[in-house]
Image (cartoon, rainbow, N blue to C red):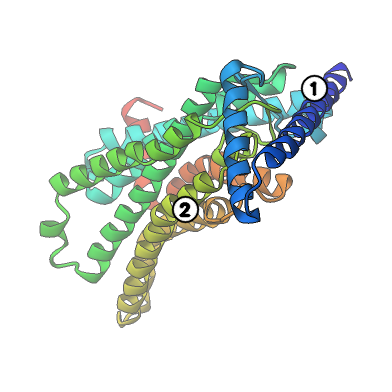
Amino acid sequence: MSSSWDQDESLSLMTCKEKEKNIHLECLRIIYFIEHPLPPLFRQLDYIQLYWDHDQKEMDTGNWSKVTEFIILGFPQLQGIQTYLFFLLLLIYLVTILGNLVIFLLVRLDTKLHIPMYQFVSVLSLLELGYTAATIPKMLANLLSHKKTISFSGCLLQIYFFHSLGASECYLLTAMAYDRYLAICRPLHYPTLMTSALCAKMAAGCWLGGLAGPIVEISLVSQLPFCGPNHIQHIFCDFPPVLSLACTDTSINVLVDFIINSCKILVTFLLILISYVQIIRTVFKIPSAEGKKKAFSTCASHLTVVIIFFGSILFMYVRLKKSYSLDYDRALAVVYSIVTPFLNPFIYSLRNKEIKNALKRQLQRIGI
């Protein structure tokens, strides 16, 4: 109750300061126009410069308070069940870690899985471990804490690792689609085209490309002034909710985010789509039903992950607005940050005989 009162008081204080500033600027405008009689257009341009100079002076002299930390609100309407949500999320996170770690180790330990297809799967599992570690531990801490704060630099680091690893996953899923295309559409040339060396280079390229991806966006956000409310209406730090808190125009940031995300998400999704169009055309040419079923079975797990992952991030990041409905954004964030990494081990293990057989062999080896 007191936190809600404190929040209302801080918002009221900010509103009063904003009104005081607007009154002061209006007085400056009237005095300025009296002393500088200019044509209307030049008056407005001159006043815009005056307004900007005044804002800069306010920021430089410290009349506006600078935000040094944010408060992540999460799901405020679920305050009464925070403890239950903590244990549910903790269970999901532990299963996610265990499942992805098992798949990663299986591929590394079982020689029969030392082929490009499963090498990519092991890299995906490793990515998921880092991807979830960027957000879920802090979400768990916030569920048990009344403060729910994160420092400005900590927020930017969370955004960076979340987006860099997410971008790496986009590129890796594209590489996996290309691998499936070569295996089904060019089976005779597959061993010579998709070598272990090429597989390693593609995986490394996915990692490096992802790590370099968010640098421009992070750099732009780090230069924005944050001097007003510091409540992030989201379950973790992300570009859209953080941009909505900046006390300046963020149109350039939104545009840059849109361009980068469009190139990163739409291009990779289009390449995956092209690969599967070619795969489907080739599969339909296979005369036997058993051959078609076998070909499709090698793609089913990958295609399922692609639909879940891209289906959520497309609606979240490829848009020209800072934010949509808060509940809409939070629901999508739960899908691509929690649900997808949680489901991946089940998708690749339950639908894949080789993974299940490898698990049985390793369990028998250790006497279980």
Left or right of 195, for residue 170:
right
Callout in the foreground (1, 2):
1
List x then y, in percent, for residue 357: 36, 44
The answer to whether residue 360 is above or below residue 347 is: above
Amino acid type shown at disc 1: Ser
Q: Gap between marks 1 and 2, in whole Å?
A: 44 Å
Residue ID at (30%, 53%): 175
Kindly tell me whether residue 243 is visible in this rendering.
yes
Residue ID at (53%, 32%): 224
Rate crowding at label 1 as few (under 14), some (14 to 19) or many (20 or more) other CA atoms within 10 Å: some
Rate crowding at label 2 as few (under 14), some (14 to 19) or many (20 or more) other CA atoms within 10 Å: some
Question: Disc 2 marks which residue?
Answer: 305
Residue 10 disc label: 1
List x then y, in percent, for residue 140: 63, 24
Quadrant (top left/top right/bottom left/bottom right) for the C terminus: top left
Amino acid type shown at disc 2: Val
List x then y, in percent, for residue 167: 40, 44
Left or right of 1, for residue 168:
left
